[in-house]
Structures are given as C-alpha cells and as structure tokens.
Image (cartoon, rainbow, N blue to C red):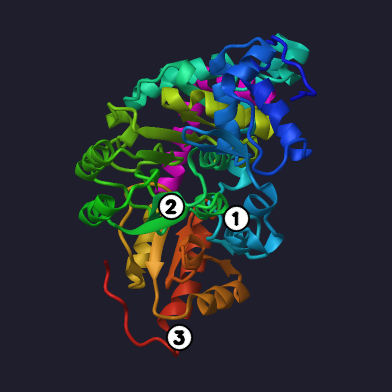
Amino acid sequence: MNFDFELKKRKDKNLYVQLYDGLKEMIINKKFKENQKLPAIRKIANFFKVNTSTVVKAYDLLEKEGFIYKKTGSGCFISNLEIKNKKEINDYDTKDFESFKYGQIQLHSNINFASSTPSINLFPIKNFKKVINKVLDRDGGEAFTYQETQGYYPLRDTISKSLKDKNINSSADRIQIVSGAQQAIDILSKILITPGDKIAVENPTYSGAISSFKNRGAIIQSFSIKNDGIDLNEFENFLKKNKIKFLYTMTNFHNPTGIKWSSKKKKTLLNLAIKYNFLILEDDCLSELYFYNKEPLSLKSLDTENKVIYIKSYSKIFMPGLRLGFIILPEKLYIPTLAVKYATDISSSGLNQRAFELYLKEGYWNNHIQTMKSLFKERFELMLDLILKYNMNLYAKPQGGLYFWLKTNIKIEKVYKKALKRGVSILPGSIFSLNNTSNYFRLSFATVEKNEIIKGMKILNDIINNDEEKKTYFPIV
C-alpha cells in the first residue's frame, strides 16, 4: 500500500490528526475500494514510525465520521460512502431554517415576540470596544492568528475560575472553546452518534438540536416535559428496554417552556445515567437570568461521575454575532472533540476569544448580566401580568429566562398569520416538536420594549380569545 502523504511533528497539528486527514483524503479520492480492508494498525504504525495508539486514534475518528467500519476480529474496512453518507438536499431537516422564517432573524413586524435575541441597543458595544482596543494594543497581529484548536488558554483558564461560582470544578484542560452552542451540538453529534443510535430529548425542545441529531441518523425518543422536568418513571421504563447514547436537556429555563428541573429530579436523572450508562448533554444558555432567589444549580455541578457534557453559550444574552461558547468534556472525549473541531473550522476567532477573556476578567460580564437581569425581570413580570389578565393558557410559570409557553385551541398557523398581519410575530410550537405538530406557541420578551409588550399582548388577546373558532380552553398541565 502506497500512501501519498507524510507525517511530521508539528505544534499546530497532532500526528493522529495528520494521519486521519491523510487517510480521509485518500478515501474521498477513491484511492481505496469499497469494503477494502485497511492495513493492520501495527503495519501502518511501522510504516509511519509512530506509536500504535496514534493509528488507533486516527481509525477511531474515521469510524466516527463514517469513512470506515470495524469488524470484530477482522479489522477495519472502507465504507460505501455513496450509499451511507450521500444526502440529497431534500433529506436534510429544514426545521431550523423554519425557525429563522418565524422570527429568529428579523421579521417585518412591529412587535417581535418570536426572537430570543436582545435588541441591538442592549449590546455592550462601548465596553467591548474597550477590551478589543486593549487586545490590539497588547497583542497586535497575534490577535488575528489561528488560536490552538482547543481555544485560547487564558480564556479557558478564566472560564475555569469563573465556573467555581456555579459550583462547577473543571480544569482549563477539560474546556473546549466553540463558536456557540449550535456548533457544540454539531460537534458532539458527530462524535457520539452513529446511524441507528438511540438518543432521548425533551418534548418540546430546541429545533437546532433536533436537526443535528436527525442529520446524523439518530433514532430520537422524546419525553414530554412537565413543570419540573420530564417524567422520570416513564423515562426509566424506556431505559429498561432500550440503550441510549445520551439525553439532551436544558434543565434551567428551558427553551421553549421556560421551566427548570427540580433539584430532586436532577439528582435522580444523574443516578439513572450511572445505572443505565448513558451521557447527558446539558445545554445552558440562560441560567444567569434567574429573577427570584438564587441561580439554580446545573446538572454539571452535581455530577460526580463525569456523566454530564456541559454546553455553555455566551451569545444568547450577550451579542449573538460573537458566536462564542464552550464545552466541558469527559477525558475520553477530549481528543475526538479536538479533531472534529479542527476539521470544522480549525479554531474559533482569536480576536473574539482574547477580547472576551478580558471582558470576563475585568468584570464587564458580571455587570452586563446584572443590567440584563434587571431589565428582563421588568419585561417578564409585565408580560406575565398580561397573560394572566387575558386568561391565556400558560403552560407553567417560569422563574427566569426569556420565554413563555402558551396553548390555544385555535390552529396555531392561523394565530401566527393573523398576528403577523397585525404587526406581531410569535413562534409556533411546531418548530420545537419532533412530529411538527403543536397547538402551543412561544413568546419571548428579549427584543421588545414595555409599550410594545402591552400593545402586542392586546392584539394576541383579540386574536385568541375573540376568535370565532374558539370554544373551550385546554386545562393547564
């Protein structure tokens, strides 16, 4: 077997990643035949003069990406890429794009209850400009070079220290910087899911996660969410008969319902993860936005057995275009995550990472959060008062976050279209549903001023409570 690439010791690229890239390129260029057996691990190790562990890591990545498959006792073989990996455009789940249509990007409506992005006048431009200028004065052109794939070390170290306030102990070495929560979900999907794997999600849940899981070929089992988390008895009954790779969850200020899991359920869920040996992907983008009492504990803060992969995004309540977040990883997933991140975009923006590290260290982030909490609490309480005043069917009363989840017996598409005609946008519940059906809708107060909330809620009341099709309300659940 002739290999048309070389391996060289490099600071920016590990040997196993070079081997993975070289073999992948040969497979894509059809230098191997379908179902052809790859050379034995020791043979390749001897050829390139590397450790066998280097070859094992490269083969593991090729298998995760679907380029090869393994037969126990027989070795590794080339996959049928045309059948296994080819996707026509129509095969991709478009639900995430539907959410953009319904308001994740700017709609031509006067009152936007659909978007969960803070209005641009809330972006902390002045202070962020200060830290960018400091970075440029300090680092010059270095700020525009590629960072190490894992992320700018001072940022990871600062994050590690700040996590202690959340009762999370994680070294900088276990933190992977990513370009937002969606990239984290995509990377983890590539690492953890092989076609046919079973995973579990809450219902309803974040549409971007559903799309990633489906596009990796996962079999998704959903569990209805109550006002304190999913029914864990129902979940355990499923686990007794089915093996899952992971559960994807938002335990604090869930999107779209706004609920938070009870402490009891969080602890029970962790025990189930240990008992049935599955991972938990905890997506946290809003835990700082608690309006009463103290910040709720994350699953990760209670995790003693490394069952929780913690995903944190800074974008949602900061500046969404910054695209910055991180993952806390179990040791066994560190190398695969690094390799997939490298293959995705090499590294997240160096300038953004350096600037945000200063933003955190100099206290701007904590001040920004306090400002946002104060503002959003006022909007939250105003919208809640109007929901109760108009006797709308609220699913559960949140204690923080950005969302309300409501139910109507009118077809939600009809409500959506009527509201849009009158200058109000909402997000239909079908966006968050696996089967694309729901009589629910989500309201967000992230973008709207108080006067817009008052006006918009009056319009929604006219549409929902005075509609000729209205007969009865569904009970609150």
Q: Is residue 390 left or right of residue 29?
A: left
> At label 1, which amino acid type do we have?
Gln
Residue drawn at 62 percent across, 60 percent down:
94
Q: Specify the principal SS of the magenta part.
A: helix
Tag 1: Cα neighbours inside 10 Å, few (<14), some, or many (≥20)?
Answer: some
Q: Is residue 50 visible?
A: yes
Tag 3 near tag 1, CB within 8 Å? no
180 or 333: nearer the viewer? 333
Residue 25 sits in quarter? top right
Q: Which residues are magenta?
A: 349-377
134 or 301: nearer the viewer? 301
270 or 72: nearer the viewer? 72
Residue drawn at 67 percent across, 31 percent down:
343
Would you name the residue on which mark 1 appears? 104
Residue drawn at 48 percent across, 30 percent down:
327
Label 2 – label 3 distance at C-alpha: 28 Å
- How far from the left and from the top, in percent, is residue 36? 66, 38
216 or 99: nearer the viewer? 216
The disc placed on residue 255 is: 2
Please say whether residue 318 is one of the residues in the magenta stretch: no
In what element is the residue under mark 2? loop
Residue 47 sits in quarter? top right
Indicate which label's residue lies in the foreground, 3 or 1.
1
Indicate which label's residue lies in the foreground, 2 or 3.
2
> At label 2, which amino acid type do we have?
Asn
Q: Is residue 362 visible?
A: no
Label 1 – label 2 distance at C-alpha: 13 Å
